[in-house]
Amino acid sequence: MKVNDLKRNLKDSSKEELIKEIVELFKKNSFVKDYYILKYDIESNSSILNKHKDIVENEFFPKRGFGKARLSVARKSITEFKKLSQDKIQLAELMVFYVEMGVKFTNCYGDIDEPFYLSMESMYDKAVKLIISAKLEDMFNHRCLGIVNDTADTGWGVHDQLSAIFYEHLGGNNKHKESSGSDLELRIQK
C-alpha cells in the first residue's frame, strides 16, 4: 500500500474511526506512543530522552553483567530518537552521551577495535557539528573537551582524531598541542 492509497482509505473514515485507529496505534506501537508523547506531553519529553539514554547505556554498562557494546543497537536508538524529536538540545545530549559511554567503556575494559573507535569518532563529529549549527557550544563545550581528555591513553589514534575535531570546531583559534587535560581546559576558556 502506498501513501496515496492510505489517504484514500482514511478519507472514507469518520473522525471517531480515525481517533480509534490512532489510539490503537498508540497502544500497540512504542514508536508511535513516543511520537505522540513528544508531540503533546511537554512534561514527559525528558522521559523519552531518558529511555533512549538507557538503551545506549545498557549496551555499555547494563545493570547486571557486562556490556555487549552492540553499537548497532545504541546507534539505532539515536536514529529513532532523531525521527521522533526535533529538539536539537536533546539530540545533542544523546549523541554526546553515546560517545561518553563508549569512551568510558574502553577506559574500563581496554582497547577495543578500529570499527568501535570509528563509530565513536563519527558520532562525535556529528554531535559537534550539530552543537555548532544549533549554537549550543556553551552547553556542551566542557563535555566535548572532557571526551577528548578522557581518550588521552586510547589507542588507534582516537585521541588525535577527537582532538582535531574539537579544535577545528569548538576550540576557537587554539592550535592543538599535546598537553595535560587541565592545560587543554585553560586554553579554551574565554
Image (tube, grey):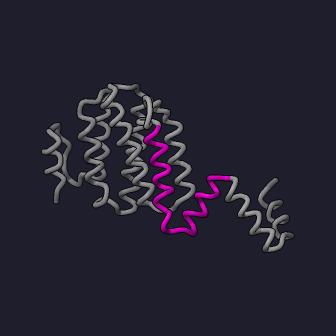
Which residue is drawn at the image coordinates 76% and 66% (left, top)? Answer: 20
Would you say the magenta stretch is mainly helix, strand or loop?
helix
Which residue is drawn at the image coordinates 43% and 37% (left, top)? Answer: 63
Image quarter of the C terminus:
bottom left
In the rendered image, residue 55, in percent from the top left (x then y), is placed at: 49, 43
- Residue 182 to residue 37: above or below: above
Q: Residue furthest front?
A: 64
Asked where in the image residue 177 lies, by quadrant, the reply is top left
State yes or no: residue 44 in magenta.
yes
Magenta range = 29-58
State yes or no: residue 24 in magenta.
no
In the rendered image, residue 83, in percent from the top left (x then y), is placed at: 57, 55
Q: Give the number of marks.
A: 0
Q: Is residue 92 left or right of residue 41?
A: left
In the rendered image, residue 166, in percent from the top left (x then y), is placed at: 29, 47
Which residue is drawn at the image coordinates 28% and 30% (left, top)? Answer: 154
In the rendered image, residue 179, in percent from the top left (x then y), is placed at: 14, 38
Q: Is residue 188 left or right of residue 108?
A: left
Asked where in the image residue 64 lies, by quadrant, the reply is top left
- Residue 136 to residue 153: above or below: below
Q: Residue furthest bottom?
A: 15
Nearer to us in this view, 53 or 167:
53
- Residue 154 to residue 38: above or below: above
